Image (cartoon, rainbow, N blue to C red):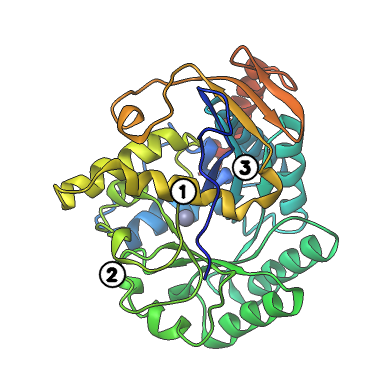
Amino acid sequence: MSTAAPGLAGPALEPGVTRAMVCGHHHLYSALARGMPAPPRTPHDFQEILELVWWRLDCALDLEMIRWSAMLGALEALERGTTAIVDHHASPNAIEGSLSVIADACAEVGVRVSCCYEVTDRNGPDGMRAGLAENEHFLRSGGRGLVGAHACFTLCEATLEAVAGLASDLGRGVHIHVAEDRMDSAAGERLEAMTTDDWLLAHCVHLDRPLRGTVAHNPRSNMNNAVGYARPARLANRVVLGTDGIGGDMLEEFRIAYVRHREDDVTATPDAAWSWLESGSALFPEAAADRVRWSYEPIDPWHLAFTPGVQPIEVVVGGEVVLRDGRPTRVDPLEVRARAREQAERLWARL
Ligand SMILES: [Zn+2]
């Protein structure tokens, strides 16, 4: 498959200016989670992190919370120079309409988004069908996105086939978590005959065989969940960087990706992590003309790997200035944060 993506910087651009930063795997719904009440007991492994934290949180979401979490997540991305987000959404008690709520919120802030609903069997057959229907409805009505699936270990064979079949019917890829933890290490075997080049495979930490598609590497999240290191340099796939829901700061994710790579291999250079950051643009060809002017130059992997706090000064998306002098032009950041805080308190009260 082609892995060619235009460089983020270079002679065609002014000094200190890059093309779009892309977050290749995000969960905008998790923006309201920070500061949430502690789980009933301390999770001891990945399965318990899902059960005690994320699957309680996503079940408590309603459309108003989804809207403000997406507004906050999009704002935080824009404030860090990220103009395009590939989102992976779950809200089992507010499925219908959730993807257009997210798409509208991102459009309001001025950030591009590719949406999907993560289909799963964990909430019964009705929940599974509603998730599939939400993907189909959103995409058939012209939405920008992929068909979503949670992870192989929460999808039976028939559900996995339904997801792949819908994606094939719609001419889209599938966005799915793959072998994030050892508990999902059967994913490679189950997906082997199913994946195509337009699939987006998040994590692949414990992937034991080649699959087709783009791999989204999320180094900080992987460390936070103690699932291990994906060692993306071993993969022949196109590799992009994602945050897995921990904000939208792609320069920071690049720094973490580099230092995690270096921890595993002392001969590693920042060029590998930089190439993963650059590859994100292949997911958003329509963002080719987006531009970010930074507070720092040169835009060079060796410089940026060791220069924290580099700020976007101006961001242009689709020809429109959406961030000027470091401030969003379309929304009031204080207002978005205040409204998101109100929704976070509503959400936490339900947990
Ligand atoms: Zn994820």
In the displayed orientation, state which residue is furthest to the right. Answer: 141
Tell whether 305 sits left or right of 139.
Answer: left
In the displayed orientation, state which residue is furthest to the top. Answer: 325
Query: Is residue 203 something that shows in the picture?
Result: yes
Find residue 50 and report its horizontal and vertical position in percent: 40, 57
Please name the residue that numbered disc 2 is placed on.
182
Tell whether 206 sits left or right of 4.
Answer: left
Please name the residue that numbered disc 3 is placed on.
84
For residue 90, above or below residue 237: above
The answer to which of marks 2 and 3 sits earlier in the sequence is 3
Find residue 8 and report its horizontal and vertical position in percent: 51, 39
Residue 124 numbered tag: none
Please name the residue that numbered disc 1 is placed on.
242
Find residue 49 and report its horizontal and vertical position in percent: 35, 54
Please name whichever residue, 172 or 49, is drawn nearer the observer in this view of the structure. Answer: 172
Tell whether 137 sits left or right of 184.
Answer: right
Please name whichever residue, 70 or 281, is drawn nearer the observer in this view of the structure. Answer: 281
Question: Given contact means CB atoms under 8 Å apart, are the residues at marks 2 and 1 in contact?
Answer: no
Q: CA distance from mark 2 to mark 1?
A: 20 Å
Q: Amino acid at mark 3?
A: Ala
The answer to which of marks 2 and 1 sits earlier in the sequence is 2
| Residue 130, image quadrant | bottom right
The residue positioned 60% from the left and 22% from the top of the image is 337
Please rate how many residues cluster around mark 2, counting C-alpha atoms within 10 Å: few if below 14, some from 14 to 19, many from 20.
Answer: some
Q: Amino acid at mark 1?
A: Gly
Q: Amino acid at mark 2?
A: Arg
Disc 3 is placed on an element classified as strand
Question: Given contact means CB atoms under 8 Å apart, are the residues at marks 2 and 3 in contact?
Answer: no
- In the image, is the residue at mark 1 within 8 Å of ligand 1 by its beta carbon? yes
